[in-house]
Amino acid sequence: FFTLFIALNWTAAPSSALDAQLQFDLGEVALRKGEYERSAIHSERALALEPSYNYARHNLTVALFHLGQTEQAVIEGKRTVSENPHRPDTHAILGRAYAEQGNIMQANSAFRKSLEIAPSSGITHYYYGRFLYDNKRYTQASHHLKEASVWQPNDPWIHYDLGRSLHR
């Protein structure tokens, strides 16, 4: 029985795929805990084992952004959307990274692409609203911040930013 179990397990999936999944899972947990450096390490390990692992590349993009490595986050984010152009979350993080770099046109384009794919994404509305506010487009900012408040009605920061945009 033991030998049969090993044989069945061996054929279920190549070890590199299982190892990549394990590294992805560890990176995902670290990302959710805000442990961005650890998440980046595990995401890179998953990608070394499975270079086309799009979810690991997205998580690497997010981790790099939060580590302040925006240039590298943009590179990885662009690779992610080239492999899977229908990932609204990656377009949104690209928007944030472009905004951080001061690249207003590309940031605007990335946020709009994210909302084109997922028009009800509250988190994208929030970050796009903040981006618009920072660029003195208060009417548009308030529209997106109102949309974000529907998504997360008890978030005080959304209401704070919405209030600021309405009083401009």
Image: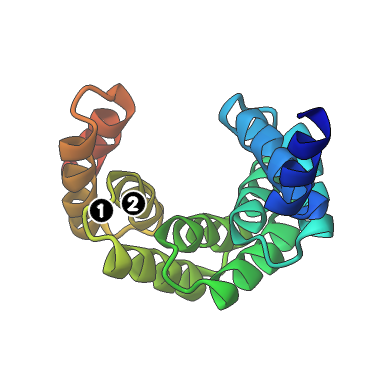
Q: Are marks 2 and 1 in contact (CB under 8 Å)?
A: yes
Q: Secondary structure at mark 1?
A: helix
- Residue flagged by tag 1: what amino acid is it? Ala
Where is mark 2, residue-wise? 133
Determine the residue positioned at 77% across, 33% down: 38
Circle number at residue 81: none
* 39 displayed left or right of 29: right
Specify few, some or many for label 2: CA neighbours under 10 Å numbering under 14, 14-19, or 20 or more. Answer: many
Seen in the picture, residue 101 relative to 142 is either above or below; the reply is below
Q: Residue furthest front?
A: 1
x, y (%) of residue 159? 23, 30
Residue, disc 1: 141
User: Residue placed at 66% from the left, 60% from the top?
Assistant: 53
| Residue 89 coordinates in the image, percent (x, y) | 45, 55
* Crowding at mark 1 (Cα within 10 Å: few <14, some 14-19, many 20+): many
> On the picture, is 164 further left or further right than 8?
left
137 up-or-down from 103: above or below = above
User: How far separated are the C-alphas under marks 2 and 1?
Assistant: 5 Å
